[in-house]
Amino acid sequence: MEASRPTSADVSQYLGAFRRHWWIALVATGAGLSAGTVLSQTMPKVYESSTSVLVQSVDQDTNAQGGRTKGSVNLDTEAQLVGSGAVAVKAAALMRSAQSPLELARSVSVQVPANTTVLVITYRAGSPAEAQSGSHSFAEAYLRNREETARAQLDRQIRSLNLKVKQLTGALTGINTKLAAAAPGSSTASNLQSLRNNSQNQLNSLTGRLNELTTTMVGGGSIISDARVPERPTSPNTLLNVGTGGMIGLLLGLALAYLRERFDRRLVTATDVRDRGRVPVLAALDERSTPHFEDVVQPYGPGGRVFNRLRNEVLASLENGDQIIVVTGASRGSASTLVAANLAVALARTGSDVVLIGAHLPDSVVDVAPLARMLGVSAVPGLSDLLAGRVGLGRALQRTPRIPSLRVITTGGAATAAGLMQSQRLRDTLEALRRQSQYVVIEAPSTSSSADAQSLASLADAAILAVELRRARRPALLDATEQLQRVGTRLLGAVVLPRLAPMRPGAAMTTPAVTLPPPMTDVGEGPTQQITFAEREPAAVRQRPPGPDSNDATAVIDLSNAGTADGDEK
């Protein structure tokens, strides 16, 4: 069982790579099919025609010891004779071809069916008529050559017998002359009579053999199936070429897909995060369940259910005394903002006192708006103002209007806050929040864009990585996990999101006015003010006169100058 797990994982990875890069295999297969079709159209057509010849035994035929065919005829030898020069010369004469006999012989092939005395002579040519003529001509030339060879052998035997008959006839004539001159009854006559009988017997035997050979009909074989005009070419085989091209293209496409998967550093699916990044996936969002920057997800919507499950897994993974959770990203972007905000909301919906800290210091003040817009709070004052000493903790904490158990410290109005994430004031703030709340969720910048993520993680009890697919890369994910391990922060897992659309800086903020609660522990601060986000207001910070029913001043704050306004107010 243990040995089968890696194999199953490898097969799963290969199938996953094919699903992600199926178009490469499709294009390569299509290219292979097209190449096979083009090859079939451009290759010269070749026609084949075959003639079957029944080979008959003649007196000079002898089968070699251990020959492949049984009987007196060695068909392996005969098959070689079909392509010989003598047969090719005769075939060229019959075909009346301008090609040399050697070139014609290259177009001939001979097959010997098992346990038969049949030769199948096949001829290949560029036209059907030429193929038929060539096959028939070589079969006819082979039979003529075989017949001529047998006739020549027979003639040699007849000439040899005639010479022997002539010699015996002369010897017999001499014996008869001597026998006529010998005395009857003498021993000489008796010997001559015996010699004449022997010579006569030999002469009779040779004469009989000579008569046999003289009357022998020479036939080396016959055509039992003549060549026919082929109806279609045997080459190129369009179906075979197209199929082979498609198969080669498919194999090449699979190889290219594997190489692309092997050297592609992007993270495309949640499986990539788990297998290639070696980070457990706590939740995977899709286009339908991914939250937006305008608001947090509803508790019973698709995204809300995902974050509810994420909350349950996080709570089950936390150890006793763990309160601070840092959410950082594996790539530049606002993925950590969405995850941190919605995770804090999911925790607060259980009735727990939760504080969300926006520590993702922006490059521009315009980027501060999403966290405030999502939760319906003021963008300033925030964490940068708190760490800079412009406001106290009670002034920076803002209670969200729709979820009373959730308080937020936004990023703040300062465009830069270099070094503030390593300050003692931040440590003191987190210690104070440990005592005042049950859970603290920190929205940190990505590990690839700032060292603040590692600094914040060192102050947290657990960490969660927000991975934006098709933007985050495997080396960045591995580096993020390594950074968290170096500071000793336990990584709970990753939350996977699809690639997010860029934020629109000019998006209107439609959240209602939020009244900040009185300071909890700070002293020396002014009275509570009502801070309102206004749509499409001028760039300057303006002070409106108090209304008839209110003694408090209402300030309209423009984000581009929020830090200055807060400093003046202080």
Image (cartoon, helix red, strand yellow):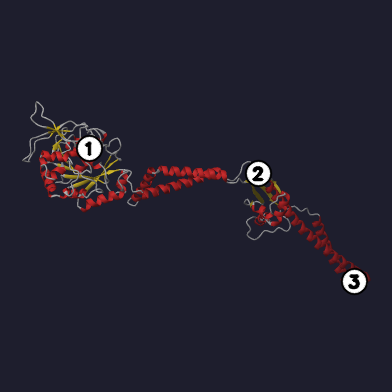
What amino acid is labelled 3 in the image? Ala
Q: Which residue is mark 3?
A: 189
Q: Earlier in the sequence, mark 3 or mark 1?
A: 3
Which mark's residue is nearer the viewer, 2 or 1? Answer: 1
- From the top left corner, tell me how far across and down residue 117 is, in percent: 67, 52
Disc 3 from disc 1: Cα separation: 148 Å
Badge 3 element = helix
Depicted 92 relative to depicted 495: above or below: below
Q: Which residue is mark 2?
A: 128
* Neighbour tally class for label 2: few under 14, some 14-19, many 20 plus, Cα within 10 Å: many
Depicted 64 relative to depicted 123: above or below: below
Disc on res. 370:
1
One can see residue 362 in this view: yes
Badge 2 element = helix
Decide which of 14, 294 is in the foreground and name it: 294
Disc 2 from disc 1: Cα separation: 80 Å
What amino acid is labelled 1 in the image? Pro
- Residue drawn 83% across and 60% down? 207
